Amino acid sequence: MRLVDHGMGVDPADMSRYMEMFNRHNEITRTVEEIPGGVRTTTQSNSPDLAAQLQAHVSSMYAHLDQSAEVMCMSSSLPTLFRHANGYRRQLTFTPNGVVAEETADDPALTQAIRAHALEVTGFIRDGMPPMMRGMMGPGMMGPGMMGPH
């Protein structure tokens, strides 16, 4: 396992990409389709630079999974997916405006984690950074004055 900056498992380029996507979340569209054993997600942007960042982000995350280089944050379901990266299938297809990702497993618990992660990412895209911050801080750690109602 490689060690990287910030103790989060991401390098500065990854972190910059995350922040750009959070800042521009309203320029991203996403659909999630449940398929047998998992999901098919389509994540896109009409902004060519943001579409390229989406492609780079998902490619980077899949590389982290393939290398067992866990990313420490962003999602409460992601640790399960890293621990069982060899137990499910991932297929990434680039589109002109983004990515289509299919993730499936034979294990029902992994299927549940895959679907939970897809819903978390959809929340990040819909709401921007607040859901990610709640996920990092845990329930009850931030009052409604800081992040609005839960």
Image: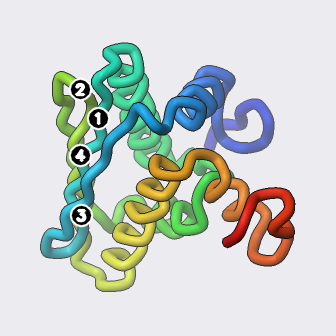
Q: Quote the CA–CA distance across marks 4 and 2.
A: 10 Å
Q: Quote the CA–CA distance across marks 1 and 4.
A: 7 Å
Q: Which of the numbered marks, if any, corresponds to residue 97?
A: 2
Q: Which residue is drawn at 45% across and 41% down?
A: 61
Front label number (3 vs 1): 1
> How would you rate the neighbour count of disc 2 (Cα within 10 Å): few for under 14, some for 14-19, many for 20 or more?
many
Q: Residue at x 25, y 53 (%)?
A: 31
Whether residues under marks 1 and 4 lie with C-beta atoms below 8 angstroms apart, the answer is yes
Which three-letter amino acid code belongs to the residue tagged 3?
Val
Whether residues under marks 3 and 1 lie with C-beta atoms below 8 angstroms apart, the answer is no
Which three-letter amino acid code belongs to the residue tagged 2?
Asn
| First reached walking from the N terminus: tag 2 or tag 1 | 1
- Along the horizontal axis of the image, is 93 left or right of 11? left
Camera-nearest residue between 95 and 60: 95
Q: In which quarter of the image is residue 93?
A: top left
Q: Which residue position holds label 4?
A: 42
Q: Quote the CA–CA distance across marks 4 and 3.
A: 10 Å
- Along the horizontal axis of the image, is 1 left or right of 94? right
Q: Quadrant of the C terminus?
A: bottom right
| First reached walking from the N terminus: tag 3 or tag 2 | 3
Q: Which residue position holds label 1?
A: 44
Q: Which of the numbered marks, if any, corresponds to residue 39?
A: 3
> How would you rate the neighbour count of disc 1 (Cα within 10 Å): few for under 14, some for 14-19, many for 20 or more?
many
Whether residues under marks 2 and 1 lie with C-beta atoms below 8 angstroms apart, the answer is yes
Q: In which quarter of the image is residue 148?
A: bottom right
Q: Which residue is drawn at 46% across and 47% down?
A: 125
Whether residues under marks 3 and 2 lie with C-beta atoms below 8 angstroms apart, the answer is no
- Along the horizontal axis of the image, is 2 left or right of 88? right
- Where is residue 50 drawn, in percent x and y? 40, 22
